[in-house]
Image: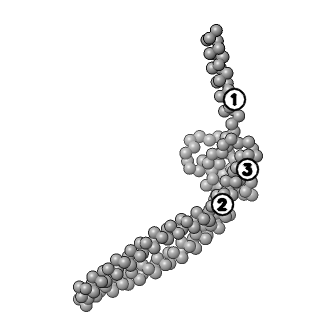
């Protein structure tokens, strides 16, 4: 009698677990592909390119100035027209200029990163809102992002890219559908 109850309990539990998983609906999309289609991303890239070009011009100016100072100092040393004290002072000035250039490069990179994050935050929010809306409307329990490459197998039947693109007012290219 105990064995029959145990077997029935195991069978009932197994079928309950199976029915729980059967009720789950899974979807996937590649958010990277979706972002490439969004005009806001293209506009952000243009703004970032302008900032990057501006920083590049400033860096080129600083580098050219450093090179002029370095060449003048080297010429004076080679001609013997610079005293040891002047050499020491000039070397210190050149080191400071070089440090300024290095610091400018670091600050510029941080500026670009922060600006990119600020420009893309509303775009990412818009994409996320569309994904959540599709998930709720179509009854998905989970929607996975396969852009990171960590999904080893995904069926095409559960690709929600077209639904999310439609929600965003975008058209997927034929290869991405």
Q: Mark 1 points at which residue?
A: 19
Q: Distance between the residues labelled 3 and 2?
A: 15 Å
**Residue 149 appearing in the image:** yes
Mark 3 residue element: helix
Q: Is residue 147 above or below residue 94?
A: above
Q: In this view, does 92 lie to the left or right of 173?
A: left
Q: Depth check: give the residue in front, 14 or 52.
A: 14
| Residue drawn at point x = 34 percent, y = 77 percent | 95
**Residue 173 appearing in the image:** no
Q: Name the residue under label 3.
A: 133
Q: Which of marks 3 and 1 is nearer the N terminus?
A: 1
Could you tell me residue 168's position as x and y percent?
73, 56
Mark 1 residue element: helix
Q: Mark 2 points at which residue?
A: 123
Mark 2 residue element: helix
Q: Which of marks 2 and 1 is nearer the N terminus?
A: 1
């Amino acid at each position: 009698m105990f064995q029959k109850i145990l077997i029935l309990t195991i069978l009932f539990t197994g079928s309950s677990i199976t029915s729980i998983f059967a009720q789950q609906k899974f979807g996937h999309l590649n958010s990277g592909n979706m972002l490439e289609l969004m005009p806001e991303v293209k506009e952000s890239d243009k703004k970032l390119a302008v900032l990057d070009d501006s920083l590049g011009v400033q860096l080129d100016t600083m580098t050219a100035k450093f090179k002029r100072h370095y060449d003048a100092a080297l010429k004076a040393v080679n001609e013997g027209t610079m005293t040891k004290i002047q050499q020491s002072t000039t070397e210190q000035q050149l080191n400071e200029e070089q440090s300024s250039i290095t610091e400018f490069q670091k600050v510029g990179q941080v500026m670009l990163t922060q600006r990119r994050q600020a420009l893309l935050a509303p775009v990412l929010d818009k994409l996320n809102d569309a994904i959540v809306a599709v998930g709720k409307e179509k009854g998905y329990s989970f929607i996975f992002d396969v852009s990171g490459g960590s999904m080893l197998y995904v069926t095409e039947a559960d690709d929600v890219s077209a639904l999310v693109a439609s929600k965003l007012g975008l058209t997927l290219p034929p290869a991405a559908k």
